Image (cartoon, rainbow, N blue to C red):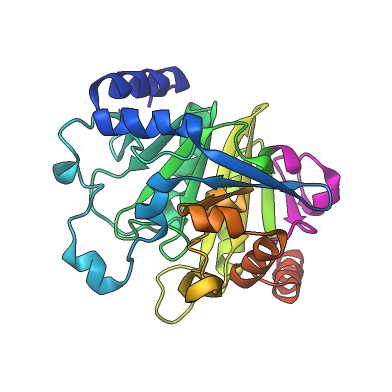
Amino acid sequence: MNLTSIEARNLLRSQLAEWALAKSNFEALNGVETKEFQFNGFMVRVQFNPARIQSSAAKVDKKSIQERKCFLCPANLPAEQRGIPFGDQYQVLVNPFPIFPEHFTMPTYNHTDQLILNRYGNMLDLAQALDEYTIFYNGPKCGASAPDHAHFQAGIKGFLPLEKDLKNAQFKETIYQSAEITVYAIRNYLRNGFLLEAKDKTASVEYFSRIYSLLELKSDDKEPMMNTLTWYDNNRWHTCIFPRKRHRPTCFYAEGDDNLLISPASVDLGGVFITPLEKDFKKIAEKDIKDILKEICIGDDKMQTIIDKLKDQ
């Protein structure tokens, strides 16, 4: 596939020189406001990023999706937007509404649903090729603003607190180990999840499928709700899987002073909460972060049930 982090970075540089919208939004990151909340052994950063309003407030109901052109289909891309291929299925594009100082979207050429099970191996390939970046996947009801078009995203490593946090044994409990892979439960971290550390791609794909098969599939959904983040480091793939129980928290729909326009996705679960409205950035407090994560992520009982079933297999 021959894609490298250097090629992706060169694409970013050329696009910033050619594409005014992308240039403006990436430059705006220099003035983005942030604040941090300290929890028990880890931190959550909040970013005020007005350009992300299109994603955070995106209408993703079936009617709205059907009535708009898909902005990831090649025929509908802005004239200024250029991509580089990754194999014959994907292209790498600069994300014109960035969160990271280096932020990409990798959609399929074909218009097909945002589903991960048969594409997780592609995610691992992307992480290995773009080894200076973290690759992430937002499920169709877990923050994806294009649930009708399969895609991953990539952000420069070191931006998400998650990457550093999960080196700490405090948040990990080993539930399976072999020569090819170690599987941890992520606990005591405000959001329950799993961490796969694999030397072997096949082992990671197989265990991902096991976890996937144990997650709840709601009657009107095509896949279990989840966010997934993967990076490649020290000849290992590191994959975090955060099962979800809810698309958006109560505060997203609330009116008046109770409203917080936050639609959590992989970046938020990675430890950077995105607030596109200044009022929310100023108002959000430690309790809000706790409440939002508790609402959208699976609880301790459900997490333990999945762990028990994994150990029994």
| Quadrant containing the C terminus in the rendered view | bottom right
Left/right placement of residue 163 relative to residue 257 reads: right
Please give the name of the residue rendered at 42% of the width and 38% of the height, measured from the top-left corner: 98
Q: Position of residue 259 (x, y in %)?
A: 51, 70
The x and y percentages for residue 159 are: 60, 35
Q: Along the horizontal axis of the image, is 202 left or right of 98? A: right
The residue that appears at 70% across and 72% down in the rendered structure is 299
**Quadrant in the picture for the N terminus:** top left
Name the quadrant containing residue 283: bottom right
Tell which of 127 and 252 is nearer to you: 252
- Of residue 92 and residue 200, the one placed in the foreground of this image is 92
Magenta region: 164-191
> Hey, which residue is sitting farthest bottom in the picture?
219
Residue 215, how many percent across, how many down? Answer: 58, 70
Picture quadrant of residue 93: top left
Q: Depth check: give the residue in front, 141 or 113.
A: 141
Q: Is residue 149 magenta?
A: no
Identify whether 33 is placed above or below 256.
Answer: above
Residue 86: tell me if it is visible. no
Q: Is residue 188 on the magenta stretch?
A: yes
Q: Is residue 255 above or below residue 189?
A: below
